[in-house]
Amino acid sequence: MKFFVDTANLDQIREAQDLGVLDGVTTNPSLMAKEGIKGKDAILKHYIDICNIVDGDVSAEVLSTEYADMIKEGEELAALHPQIVVKVPATKDGIKAVKYLSGKDIKTNCTLVFSAGQALLAAKAGATYVSPFIGRLDDTSTDGIALIAQIVEMFNYYDFETQVLAASIRHTMHIIQCVEAGADVATCPLHAIEGLLKHPLTDLGLAQFAKDTQKMS
Ligand code: E4P
């Protein structure tokens, strides 16, 4: 399973990259706004900065909601850097934009996916990734992981090449559940990735080894 870090914070992206297991980055307008990025030039520069830190795919979301504007914006984003993946919402205009952009060999990430039907249309339109939002579904008493499993099964059954990018991951256990469900990618906050390393027995074992190391000197 690939690991993307879900942030627009350059320090966190560097930290995740330094860990040596990072495969890409996802951003969205809320994450960009959180970093205080304002205005078109600053937005485009920020995406290039991210691409210069990591080796893999970097999702950059269109801000437009109408088809004609989405494809114009998508082409502009894709021209920024070969690592850019154009992120488009799972709406009627969005699906049309995915179809258009994938026809131009531009990588796409169909986002704000909350149902198998949306994922099906995104895959048929040729999306590189679909992003089902686990945490936001869990917030509404709906099983987000069950949707990941359902989409994985559907894509396997029909041999769709579209990758299931589990998004809206809130904590470490979500990552493990994504592995069990067969997601291709998990995009995670840095703390959720780092949580994979946490184990009290590792800490205890290390403390004991440190004590015993002293006995050897
Ligand atoms: C990433 O592609 C999504 O935009 C992101 O994971 C959404 O996460 P949130 O539901 O925690 O805002």
Image (spheres, grey):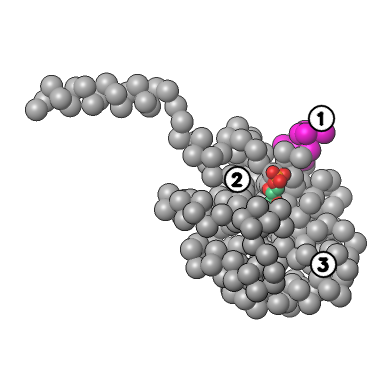
Residue at position x 29%, y 24% from top?
207
From the top left corner, tell me how far across and down residue 115 is, in percent: 84, 46
Tag on residue 64?
Answer: 3
Tag on residue 44?
Answer: none
Front of the two marks 1 and 3: 3
Residue at position x 56%, y 39% from top?
192
Front of the two marks 2 and 3: 3
Magenta stretch: dominant secondary structure: helix
> Which residue bears the numbered disc 1?
141
> Which residue bears the numbered disc 2?
188
- Determine the secondary structure under disc 2: strand
Judge from the rendering whether residue 209 lies leftward or rightward of residue 23; answer left or right.
left
* Alpha carbon distance from label 1 to label 3: 30 Å
- Determine the secondary structure under disc 1: loop
From the top left corner, tell me how far across and down residue 106 is, in percent: 69, 73
Judge from the rendering whether residue 21 lies leftward or rightward of residue 79; answer left or right.
left
Q: Amino acid at mark 3?
A: Ser
Extent of the magenta region: 137-149
Answer with mark 1 or mark 3, whichever residue precedes in sequence.
Answer: 3
Q: Quadrant of the C terminus?
A: top left
From the top left corner, tell me how far across and down residue 61 is, in percent: 72, 62
